[in-house]
Image: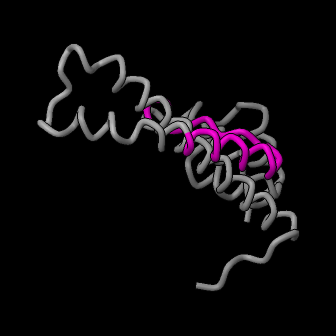
Amino acid sequence: SYSPERIEKIENGRTQIQPEDALLLAEYYRTPSLRNYYCVNECPIGQVHALRTESKELAQIAVETLNAVNKLSSSRDRLLEIVEDGEVQADEYADFAEIKATLDRIALSVSNLQLWVDEQIATGKLEHPKL
């Protein structure tokens, strides 16, 4: 539980936000995107490795995901050729970079879908899955 004074200090930048603050504030405000914002803007590891997720409509996420999966599907044989020897040769690099970019788009789509699910749960539109 946070005092209004603590929240005000965090919101106005008078105190350094900590990871646990980001988690609790995201829950308090029912805004899961605050977690990602913290990771990509405040956390040194997240600034390098976290995906910058976006709040999007489910249909847009699905279309982006399926387009990337279809592109990867058509590149499958080329990927197998490239990785067969365990190395990426100079003449394979351009194709490999394009395939990696497609994989990155799929990873971002998955991350956007997770954010969508988290937003639906936070606003009560979906129930949290029972594990």
Q: Is residue 98 above or below residue 30?
A: above
Residue 39 visible within the image: no
The picture places residue 74, in percent across and down from the top left corner, at 47, 38
Residue 112: where, in percent of width, then height?
A: 67, 47
Spot the residue most to the bottom: 130
Q: Residue at x 54, y 43 (%)?
A: 106
Q: Is residue 71 left or right of residue 61?
A: left
Magenta: main secondary structure:
helix
| Number of numbered discs | 0
Q: Quadrant of the N terminus?
A: bottom right
Nearest the viewer among 68 and 52 is: 68
- In depth, the one of 16 and 117 nearer the eye is 117
Q: Which residues are magenta?
A: 47-70
State the quadrant of the C terminus: bottom right
Residue at 78 percent across and 32 percent down: it is: 12
Q: Is residue 51 magenta?
A: yes
Q: Is residue 15 left or right of residue 99?
A: right
Residue 12 vs residue 19, the one in the foreground: 19
Image coords of residue 52 (percent x, y): 61, 35
How far across and how far down the image is residue 88, in percent?
Answer: 20, 26
From this view, report whether residue 121 is shown above or below residue 73: below
Q: In the visual, does 48 lie left or right of 5? A: left
Residue found farthest to the left: 85
Colouring of the image? one colour
Residue 42 among those drawn in magenta: no
Q: What residue is at 62 percent from the left and 44 percent from the top?
A: 109
User: Which of the 4 quarters of the picture holds residue 56?
Assistant: top right
Residue beneath the point at 24% across and 35% down: 81
Whether residue 49 is visible? yes
